[in-house]
Amino acid sequence: MNKDKIVKIRAVKPEIRVLGIDDGVFIPHTKGVVDVIGIVFRGGYWLDGVMRTQVEIDGMDATEKIASMIVESPHYDQLRVIMLNGVTMAGFNVVDIEGLYEKLKLPVIAVTRDKPNFSDIKKALQNLPQSEERWKAIEKAGKLIKVYTRSGEEPIYAHVVGVSEEDAERILKNTSTRSNIPEALRVAHLVASGLGPVRRSKENQ
């Protein structure tokens, strides 16, 4: 990433508006769509909004669908940072986080609890169409950084695009108020995880 493209954040305020995005429950290696939920938080304390889209399982539409979800949201103009639960949604529907940054002009931080095994990921992608394109999107995410967001807890890992590593670390620490994961991502995971079983039970009635 060209350093001239990095968004300069003068101060990471406690109420900085971040969007946490996570996908819902699905059965791997099946066809269909998966809910993707966005949760808007001011810092790590105040929930400001919810947004939703759907992406294909192991598809190629995650970047476009997420970008459209955000642009069409009334919260778009107030957002300062986008956070993703990893660089893939709905299996191996890879989010091009550099492309997402270019579309939205907002920094993107893709967070994982565990350090990804990129050799295993690359091998798994070989079983899918457009495997090279998927892998290039992962490579474009850049290096992985390790961040200790809370004293005495395990570190998290993150790909960072559009903001300096130092600012990204400050944002992650500032927004991780109840666990070592930013609160917007933690709540997005809870909401997205709850949607799948509820929807299936209704459809089976």
Image (tube, rainbow, N blue to C red):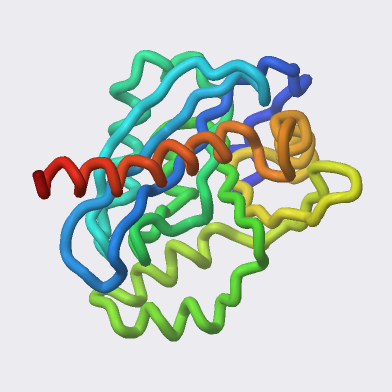
**Residue 91 occupies quadrant:** bottom left
Asked whether, in this view, residue 56 is left or right of residue 14, the answer is left
Q: From the image, which quarter does the C terminus lie in?
A: top left
Q: Is residue 101 visible?
A: no
Q: Taking 55 as reference, is 191 above or below it? A: above
Q: Is residue 193 visible?
A: yes
Q: Report the residue at 26% width, 49% height from top.
A: 55
In this view of the protein, which residue sits in the foreground, 111 or 34? 34
Residue occupying the far right of the picture: 152
Residue 71 image position (x, y, % from top left): 34, 25
Asked whether, in this view, residue 27 is left or right of residue 204, the answer is right
In this view of the protein, which residue sits in the foreground, 99 or 13? 13
**Residue 4 occupies quadrant:** top right
Q: How many marks?
A: 0
Asked whether, in this view, residue 82 is left or right of residue 55, the answer is right
Q: Report the residue at 80% width, 56% height from top.
A: 154
Q: Report the residue at 33% width, 76% height from top.
A: 131
Residue 194 image position (x, y, % from top left): 38, 42
**Residue 90 occupies quadrant:** bottom left
Residue 133 image position (x, y, % from top left): 34, 69
Q: Report the residue at 21% width, 69% height from top.
A: 30
Residue 34 image position (x, y, % from top left): 27, 50
In this view of the protein, which residue sits in the foreground, 131 or 112? 112
Asked whether, in this view, residue 102 is left or right of residue 12, the answer is left
